[in-house]
Image (spheres, rainbow, N blue to C red):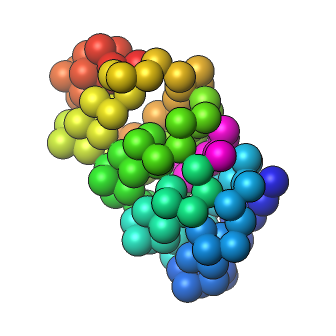
Amino acid sequence: EIMLEGQTWLSDDLLFKIGEFCPNLKLLNLAGCMQLSSRTIIRIAEGCQLLALVNLSHCTNVSGEAVARLLQNCPQLQVLCLSGLPLDHGGVSTFRTLHSSRRIRALDLSYCAGLTDQSLIAISQYC
């Protein structure tokens, strides 16, 4: 379990190490880590495949592609917090990854200003 919520000073390079050295990690809270990038989330998705809860709220540099990698590589993921991420309708295509396994039990999309009616319909089809 790693809880680093609000640690805006943490560098992306330091956070990248989580994906390298924490393969048994199950809970990861990086909410508000403003320097966090998609590159690091993709590395974490590759190296921490046992994740069950991930909070990326207000990590505005994280793309829909990076979220898709989490969904693809972490089959035990049940709780995903994406509040405040810049997910628009294109980013919602990320949730097609969920179609094969409806394992997500909680999905937080609060304050994702780019969401539309079409986005929510797409999400409801895949969650």
**66 versus 7 height, above or below:** above
Which residue is drawn at the image coordinates 26% and 44% (left, top)? 91
Q: Position of residue 16 (x, y in %)?
A: 56, 76
In the displayed structure image, the side of residue 60 where residue 51 appears, left or right = right
**For residue 39, which quarter of the picture?**
bottom left
93 or 6, nearer to the observer: 93
**107 versus 63 height, above or below:** above
Q: Over which residues does the magenta segment extend?
A: 50-57
33 or 15, nearer to the observer: 15
Which residue is drawn at the image coordinates 43% and 22% (left, top)? 101
In the displayed structure image, the side of residue 109 where residue 97 appears, left or right = left
Quadrant (top left, top right, bottom left, bottom right) of the N terminus:
bottom right
Which residue is drawn at the image coordinates 38% and 56% (left, top)? 66
Does the stretch in magenta take in 119?
Answer: no
**Viewer can see residue 5:** no
Q: Position of residue 124 (x, y in %)?
A: 34, 15
Q: Position of residue 80 (x, y in %)?
A: 56, 37
**11 versus 122 height, above or below:** below
**Viewer can see residue 16:** yes
**For residue 32, which quarter of the picture?**
bottom right
